[in-house]
Amino acid sequence: MLYSTKEDGGNLYTEKEYANFVFRFEFRLTPNANNGIGIRAPLEGDAAYVGMEIQVLDDGGSMYTKLEPGQYHGSIYKVVAAKRGFQKPVGEWNAEEITASGRQITIKLNGTTIVDANLDDVKDEAVLRSTAT
């Protein structure tokens, strides 16, 4: 991983590109936390719109009472909605695993598969343009 600075917006990038991968990480949210993991995205632009973003969010937070299904934690942002109910409360550690194998994206949160999606099954034309990479 490359180091992040305030000037680059706080983004971290891998030094190499990966076609297929498994990314495992642990995280602990603060109230109303909102972040994401950009995958299959170019090094410039917002990964949520020019690639894919796996949402990392305190979706039970007071700022997020009117979310669309594809905006909750673990979702492929505005592409595939994640199953809910497997995130631990704010302040507790969570374990997540993102697997990308071709057009198949699988996300496990605390041992439960919350997304198991083949991007070829996405039929919305606007969404398809953003996941073409």
Image (spheres, rainbow, N blue to C red):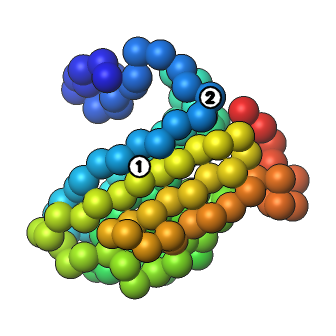
Name the kind of residue labelled 1 in the image: Gly
The answer to whether residue 96 is seen in the rendering is yes
Q: CA distance from mark 1 to mark 2?
A: 19 Å
Answer with left or right where residue 25 lies relative to residue 36.
left
Q: Position of residue 131 (x, y in %)?
A: 72, 43
Q: Position of residue 86 (x, y in %)?
A: 37, 79
Residue at 18%, 73% in the rendered image: 90
Classify mark 2: residues with Cα within 10 Å, few (<14), some (14-19) or many (20+). Answer: few
Q: Could you say whether the residue bearing mark 2 is in a helix, strand or loop?
A: loop
Answer with left or right where residue 47 lies relative to residue 108.
right
1 and 2 marks in contact (CB < 8 Å): no
Residue at 24%, 20% in the rendered image: 3
Give the camera-side residue of 8 and 93.
93
Q: Could you say whether the residue bearing mark 1 is in a helix, strand or loop?
A: strand
Relative to 92, does residue 127 appear above or below in the rendering?
Answer: above
Q: Which residue is mark 2?
A: 19
Q: Tell me the quadrant of the picture where the C terminus can be found.
A: top right
Residue at 31%, 23% in the rendered image: 1
Identify the mark nearer the N-term, 1 or 2.
2
Name the kind of residue labelled 2 in the image: Ala
Q: Which residue is mark 1?
A: 36
Residue at 14%, 70% in the rendered image: 92
